[in-house]
Amino acid sequence: MKVRKFRPPNRLTALIKERGGIMAKDAIAAAEAGVESLRESSMAALDEAIAEIERRFGKDTPERVSEAYEGLYVLGSRIIDVSAFVSDAGIDKAAVSLCTLVDSCEGAGYWRWDAVDVHIDALRLLRAHGALLPVDQRDAMLQGLYQVSNYRPDEA
């Protein structure tokens, strides 16, 4: 008895062997270039969000007491959205903590301005120097913000 092996054609194998298309390394390089093209506009949006937070909710803004909770929450969310290029600075984590703080303020029905002020100062500091800070100092700052806002990263 003779055994005959039969191997049906594999469409994926045929496509891989076909000329044309793009090499994986080229696709990755193109994707990185595409993301990099967003750096400048993302950093501008980040700086604009921080400036607007300071303008509307800063210590020297008497009108801040009449601002809606949603306004600060949206600005904090905007920081989270565009902070990918400074992920080593911790600004995204500080913004999450700020949003948690705003949630708790809204739930309680009153602003905790001392905690808001600490978060605004931290956002400003992390934007300017966060990536340059030693990791343990940056982590200690973030842990302090988490305590103020009651945000628990391990429960997120």
Image: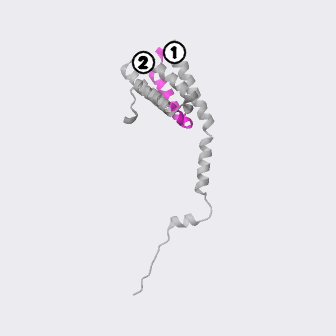
**2 and 1 marks in contact (CB < 8 Å):** no
**Residue 42 occupies which quadrant of the picture?**
top right
Q: Which residue is painted at 44% across and 28% down in the image? A: 97
Is residue 65 visible in this depiction of the protein?
Answer: yes
Is residue 71 visible in this depiction of the protein?
Answer: no
Which residue is label 2 attached to? 112
Relative to 17, does residue 94 appear above or below in the rendering? Answer: above
From the viewer's side, name the closer residue of 126 and 4: 126
Q: Which residue is painted at 51% across and 12% down in the image? A: 62
Point out the stretch of residues depicted in magenta: 64-91
Residue 100, percent from left and from top: 42, 27
Q: Which residue is painted at 52% across and 32% down in the image? A: 134
Residues under labels 2 and 1: Cα distance?
12 Å
Residue 65 colored in magenta in the image: yes
Residue 28, percent from left and from top: 58, 51
Q: Please tell me how crowded label 1 is: few (under 14), some (14-19), or many (20+) other residues with Cα within 10 Å.
A: some
Relative to 37, does residue 73 appear above or below in the rendering? Answer: above
Task: Indicate the amino acid at tag 2.
Answer: Arg
Describe residue 110's horizontal placement relative to residue 117 as left or right. Answer: left
Residue 115 colored in magenta in the image: no
Which residue is label 1 attached to? 59
Secondary structure beneath label 2? loop
**Residue 150 occupies which quadrant of the picture?**
top left
Describe residue 53's horizontal placement relative to residue 150 as left or right. Answer: right
